[in-house]
Amino acid sequence: MRNCLALAGTFVFGLVACAPKDKPAIATTDSATTATATTATPAPNVVTVHAKDFAFSAPPQIPSGMTTFKLINDGPALHHVEIVRLDSGKTVADLDAELAKPAAPPTWAVFEGGPNAPDPTKGANATLDLQPGNYAMICLVDVPGGVPHFAKGMVYPFTVTAAPAGATAAAPTADMTITLTEYAFGLSAPLTAGTHTFAVKNSGTQMHEVELVRLAPGKTLDQWMSWINKPMGPPPGSAIGGISPFVGAPNYFTADITPGNYVLICFVPDAKDGKPHFMHGMLKTLTVM
Ligand SMILES: [Cu+2]
């Protein structure tokens, strides 16, 4: 589903940030928080990201710590957010140059995850721990048309600044764990209907992702994959979200699961042969009663 092509350019947009109801808002700059002196652990900072064809709108500065990215896909294509940490003083220009090469990313570009793709007009979320530094959010999705969206401008630089002391939020409490390995998804319990918070852990040696797809009744994954490449007629499935490709620390996401047939899928190209991991068996079908 992915390959690497020359980059078209980099665009910068304004900021949108919000916080959940009843939780103290944390500013996207280094101003003090509104939290009062209590012993309660603060909730993760919430950062809203809008994606459209082909640009991100997000805050240029985010405080460090546990952060929930809420992606709104304004469409019309599928989009996700891949959070890339740029180490060793590297910049988005350096990342652009590397993304144009058909090779694995360099070690200074650390893929940390982020919300995977929801359907157009829908949302997805991911919570991860951000260290101070330089970052980019990029979109690796290449449907329809086969050109990855980062090559069409979906590269957005942002900075993570050190959060004020005492502002550290704990990781979300997950009721399920999804473990990623070569080449499988392990679930800590059978998937059931309801709202779940998933901890997603990569125990493999390669980068992996989880994209959660809900199939329409009687439809197959093949039909959905054909449709996202060439959308015609009613969709044979819905992209729910999940976690974009990552290595290292876990990501968390929350999703509402309704009865039906689901597929967990990893599109990451294999380090050895370049084939997407689902072709190595990294897909799992589930029926939720
Ligand atoms: Cu994988």
Image: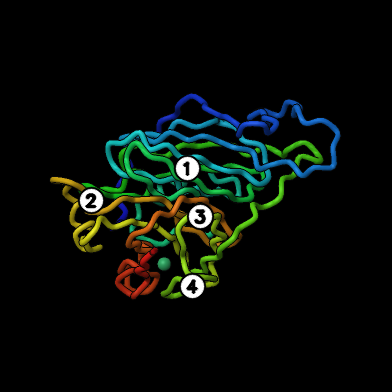
Question: Which image quadrant: the N terminus?
Answer: bottom left
> Which label's residue is closer to the chain start, 2 or 1?
1
Which is more N-terminal, label 4 or label 2? 4
Q: Earlier in the sequence, mark 3 or mark 2?
A: 3
Tell me the number on the disc at residue 186: 4
Q: CA distance from mark 3 to mark 4?
A: 21 Å
Residue type, numbered disc 1? Met
Ligand 1 located in image quadrant = bottom left
Q: CA distance from mark 3 to mark 2?
A: 24 Å
Instruction: Note whether 59 is above or below 133 in the view shown.
Output: above
Secondary structure at badge 1 equals strand
Judged by depth in the image, the label closer to the viewer, 2 or 4, is: 4
238 to 35, vertically: above or below: below
Q: CA distance from mark 2 to mark 1?
A: 22 Å
> In terms of depth relative to the viewer, which is nearer, 90 or 143?
143
Residue holding disc 3: 111
Q: Where residue 44 appears, x then y in whole percent?
A: 65, 42
Asked if disc 1 is less than 8 Å from ligand 1, the answer is no
- For the question of whether residue 283 can be seen, the reply is no
Quarter of the view holding residue 9: top left
Residue type pointed to by label 3: Phe
Residue at x-position 67% and y-position 31%? 22
Q: Nearer the viewer, mark 2 or mark 1?
A: 2
The structure residue drawn at horizontal position 66% and vertical position 28%, both measured from the top left corner, is: 27
> Which three-letter amino acid code belongs to the residue tagged 2?
Ile
The reply, left or right, for residue 77 in relation to residue 86 is left
Query: Which mark's residue is nearer the viewer, 3 or 4?
Result: 4
Can residue 31 be seen? yes
| Closer mark to the observer between disc 3 and disc 2 | 2
Mark 1 burial class by Cα count in 10 Å: few <14, some 14-19, many 20+: many
Instruction: Please tell me which of labels 3 and 1 falls first in the chain.
Output: 3
Q: What residue is pinned by disc 1?
A: 137
